[in-house]
Amino acid sequence: MNLITYGFFGEDEAQRLFLRNYLLQLRDLLGKPEVTFTPNEDFHGRFRVVNKQQVDALFAEAGLQGFLSYHLHLYFVGRDCDHHNQKDCTNLRKAMELKMDPRWRDRTIVFVPVQCIEHWLWYLKWNRENPGVTKNVNLENQSNADAKLAVYGRKKSTLKYSQPIVEELTALIPVDWLCTRSESFRAFHQKTVASVTQILA
């Protein structure tokens, strides 16, 4: 299989862009340059959300429809954790996974960044600004507002302003490095690799 279609159901555009650019790079990490990850735009158009309450209420049904009606190969759910306790974030991710239909749990990837997606982006920015530095800084215990200020230069940002920044930061993701810095990213990456490997087997 060279074409893998996926659906995304998450809180914001930054999550969607991060996911898209991550998947573009994943095929090379897996040594499968012939594989193309394609978002199902019909699914995305039907299942747009604007906040975490909608994600919590609808993600299981959206996933069911994604696999049955849109014939997705993979389904991604993005949900910010909004606090820095890694155990709570892990428990939230596992609880959400259990709400999915068992037939498609292995093809559903719930990613729950500690705090918010901007913390993953902040790590990418820090890595870019500190090349070769091996110091293990913990950014995930900083507030959401601090992360957004660090990434976007302001605590509140419009999509028009933030989208180019997210595109630039995710154009080249040091996946192995980010796995060593963020447990929540590592969980997302490992589950994605396992799901894709199963599909391609």
Image (tube, helix red, strand yellow):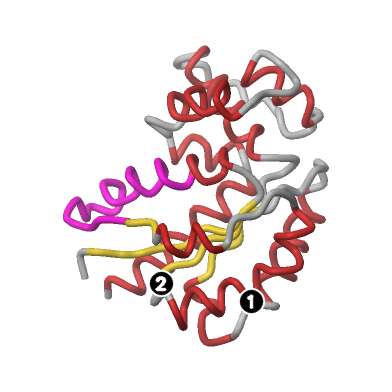
Disc number placed over residue 76 in the picture, else none: none
Residue 104 in percent (x, y) is at 51, 80
> Quick one: quadrant of the C terminus?
bottom left
Residue 86 in percent (x, y) is at 76, 49
Residue 76 in percent (x, y) is at 53, 61
Q: Is 54 above or below relative to 151?
A: below
- For label 1, the SS is helix
Mark 2 neighbour class, 10 Å CA radius: few under 14, some 14 to 19, many 20 or more? many
Lateral position of residue 47 relative to residue 116, left or right = left
- For label 2, the SS is loop
Residue depicted at 45% across the width and 32% down the height: 170
Residue 17 in percent (x, y) is at 48, 40
Marks 1 and 2, the one that precedes in the sequence: 1
Determine the residue located farthest toward the bottom in the rendered image. Answer: 103
Residue depicted at 33% across the width and 56% down the height: 38
Q: The magenta stretch spans which residues? A: 19-37
Nearer to us in this view, 42 or 18: 42
Residue depicted at 40% across the width and 41% down the height: 21
Q: Is 139 above or below relative to 106?
A: above
Q: Is 113 above or below relative to 97?
A: above
Q: Is 96 above or below relative to 152?
A: below
Mark 1 neighbour class, 10 Å CA radius: few under 14, some 14 to 19, many 20 or more? few
Q: Which residue is mark 1?
A: 61
Residue depicted at 41% across the width and 72% down the height: 72
Q: Which residue is mark 2?
A: 72
**Does 186 lie within the magenta span?**
no
Q: CA distance from mark 1 to mark 2?
A: 14 Å
Kind of residue at badge 2:
Leu
Q: Are marks 1 and 2 in contact (CB under 8 Å)?
A: no
